[in-house]
Image (cartoon, rainbow, N blue to C red):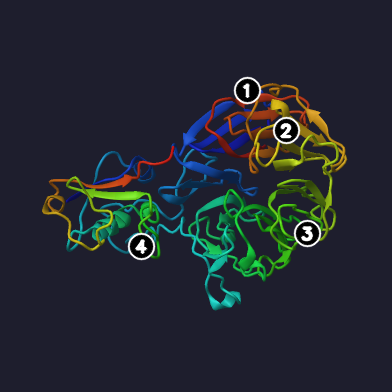
Amino acid sequence: MSAIRVLVGTRKGAFILTADGAREDWSVSGPHFAGWEIYHVKGSPVDPDRIYASQTSEWFGQVIQRSNDGGVTWEQPGSGPKLPETPPGAEDGEPMPQGKSNMFVYDTSVETGKPLTTHQWYDGTQHPWEFARVWHLEPSLTDPDTVYAGVEDAALFRTTDGGQTWHELAGLRGHDTGADWSPGAGGMCLHTILLDPADPERIYVAISAAGSFRTLDGGKTWTTINRGLSSSFMPDPTAEIGHCVHRLAMHPSNPDRLFMQKHWDVMRSDDAGANWYEISGNLPSDFGFPIEVHAHEPETVYVVPIESDSLHYPPEGKLRVYRSRTGGNEWEALTNGLPQKDCYVNVLRDAMAADSLDPCGIYFGTTGGQVYVSPDGGDHWSSIVQNLPSVLSVEVQTLS
Amino acid sequence: MIRVEIPFHLRTLAGVDGEVALTVDGEVTRASILDALETRYPMLRGTVRDHVTLKQRPLVRFFACKEDITHDPPTAPLPDAVASGAEPFLIVGAIAGG
């Protein structure tokens, strides 16, 4: 019997929602890490019981949490308490806790070629690169101890020891354009990491508000992939960088095809990001944050239109997911079970996910604390929970 | 023993209730207390001060004997009442935000 585990990050803790394959009767556990902002929670595709969480606070900084039992118990990797009776050097041979799992230090070594120390600030001046938080954790497709972390200020880090230590893949920040990157309204965050299942050396990332980047050598060197994007707020709307990409999505069966929800515009690339074209079509608004692909239909895409960059809520107060079965341009509103009046929530960029059951389930969480599920690809929706803290992220695990 | 009160969010992180009791080697200062705290509870490293620079996080305050000592030098000696354990050393999250 299959089962579903939904991992929800909120402004005040993490929640885990579980159900069997029918996806009708749900159990809720949490809050985990109560009172902390949980930007993202995601499980390893290799070992679903290995789950990583990004726990953050304006007051107390970054914490990384790891579970080895599907979210029942958690630990900070390599940061366990030092027992009072434990002598220095730990006589049982266990290494002393290092407490480095939340240590994200930008690489300034000469090996990176050009160790950057500043980027462009809102006022056009140069500003020091400062770590704020981990926005997104992307576990490796092949190794449960390897995880990529997208952080603010924008950079890509990786652990290969289960989260005990993190090291920057500095080639990204060392890109020729790095000093010209500047933050979006939410900070200069690296929020999307797509790992190519067919080519472990190929990774896509997206940064607000720098744009999208691709590496073909496992993160050593990077190329901008923003040709075809147009952002009217920029002096040069089609510049190489500066685009506020909100989210990228990819179907694992076709890693050359990418979908993008940009600040404005829903976009698609059929050549691994080399060129983009608009697929907004008949959407009521092409502003939004998340974009997701159906698990079994690579041409079926989901977005949640938002009124505008100034009005972060659904047009007409109607919460509508839009689905395209044609890879974009032709969109249908999915409303069955969603509030169709007086609804003014937002759906953030990491707060939508799809399971891999058949029929495919679609999930999303709102800033109003609701998490919705559609067990039939978007035709019918119901709320799993209605009153969580504001939802920052939603991921789903399909368990056999 | 030095008595240290840490804020709610850090108590949950360290898995402790109420005060923690620490043995501090040498002179009792804010820096030596934080050294002892982070040695005993490695999961608190980076939450009160930066891993590398040891710079205090901006929204964390320190109190001793009803005085805000946040801006005193970190190596300044603390009052005898803290060093003797008669009074706790307080680490406080700034009252700001939601």
What kind of residue is marked 1? Asp
Direction from residue A349 to residue A162 in the image, left or right: left
Q: Residue at x 54, y 29 (%)?
A: A388
Specify the quadrant of the image occupied by residue A212.
Answer: bottom right
What kind of residue is marked 2? Gly
Vertical side of A109 occupied by A238: above or below: above
Tags 4 and 2 on a common chain: no
Q: Residues within 10 Å of mark 2 (few under 14, many from 20)?
A: many
Mark 2 highlights which residue?
A361
> On residue A238, which mark appears?
3
Label 2 element class: loop
The first of marks 3 and 1 along the sequence is 1
Q: Disc 2 is attached to a residue of which chain?
A: A
Residue A304 lies, in percent from the top left, at 72, 36
Q: Do tag 3 and tag 1 residues touch (Cβ < 8 Å)?
A: no
Vertical side of A342 occupied by A309: above or below: below
Camera-near label (4 vs 2) is 4
The quarter of the picture where the C terminus of chain B appears is top left
Camera-near label (1 vs 4) is 4
Mark 1 highlights which residue?
A25
What kind of residue is marked 3? Thr
- Gap in angstroms between the C-alphas marked 4 and 2: 47 Å
Camera sees residue A348 = yes
Mark 4 highlights which residue?
B54
Camera-near label (3 vs 4) is 3
Q: Disc 1 is attached to a residue of which chain?
A: A
